[in-house]
Amino acid sequence: MDQGEFLRRLDEINVWRRHGQRAPHKPLLLLLALGRLQQGKQRLALYELDIRDRLRDLLRRFGPQRRRYHPEFPFWHLRSDQLWEIPDEELATIKGGSAASPSDRQLTDLAVHGGLPEPVHRLLEGNPDLVQTAAQRILDGHFAPSLHEPICDAVGMDRHVEISEKLRRRRDPNFRHAVLTAYERRCAVCDFDIRIEDDLVALDAAHIQWHAAGGPDNVRNGLALCILHHRTLDRGAIGLERATGGYRLLVSDVVNGQSNALRHLLRHHGKRVRNPQRNEQRPAPGFVDWHRREVFRGSPR
């Protein structure tokens, strides 16, 4: 196993896809494993004590909202990507080594262990920069940029890597300019437009359907948002709902707090979001529906 082969396997993870639904199970399990490696923990982790509850919490926090979360799925199926290993003697006890996915109860009752394959572990253990690169590669490929830092904190990783050159090349450099121009260089929610001389401060071109989830660099998949509203959009604290002549803002009922910032956010609940300059630049319904289904948390207030 060399570095090139390892990174190729990361890029080719077989992630379940159907109708644009997000399935971050394998990426989150890998990030959890990388965090364990960086902390010097044992290669093989016990499903019940080390993986199950932490991965379920990661899925709840950073995955799409679902009635149930299944940490057992990636724990079993990541093996097919040659990036996860369950000891042979334990495999033999699980449905006779069948490829069918064992239940959470089976993995728990049989005290099953899993972790990075030994060749991968050896490669990473002696190369901390590669650990960082691998984590960044997973984050770039599966999550919105504003989620990278909180995910790293949740899995216990230090992160000191800039966004990869690969990501910079893949994104359209004209997207930001087109979106900010369409919304007259103001936040579409609160009209924030602070500048230092002629330079905008803390105003972003946000993707409605994440770029990492196949969302295009198209003005109809964009909103000009201040940092507060960009981050709350990416975390699913706010969303959009179609209204006559445009969209209105929704605030999730799971958002809470005691600060003026929450009261500021709630003031915009149910209010119209600024339209872009031209009707043909308005967010496309398909992108808005994706965000409501795959990112928005809880229910609208």
Image: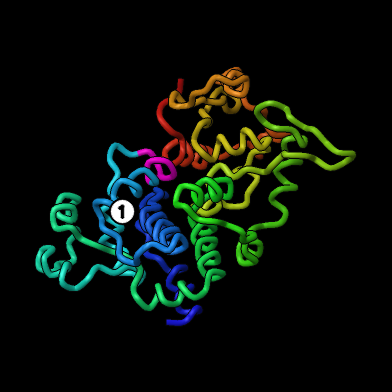
Residue 60 among those drawn in magenta: yes
**Residue 91 locus on image (x, y percent):** 17, 68
Residue depicted at 41% across the width and 45% down the height: 63
Extreme bottom residue here? 1
260 is higher (above) or lower (below) than 125 = above
**Residue 124 locus on image (x, y percent):** 46, 72
Residue depicted at 30% across the width and 60% down the height: 45
Q: Which residue is mark 1?
A: 50
From the viewer's side, name the closer residue of 270 and 242: 270
Residue range corresponding to the magenta coloring: 59-65
Location of residue 87 (image quadrant): bottom left
25 is higher (above) or lower (below) than 164 = above
Report the quarter where the N terminus lies: bottom left
Residue depicted at 66% across the width and 34% down the height: 279
Residue 1 among those drawn in magenta: no
User: What amino acid does circle 1 point to?
Assistant: Asp
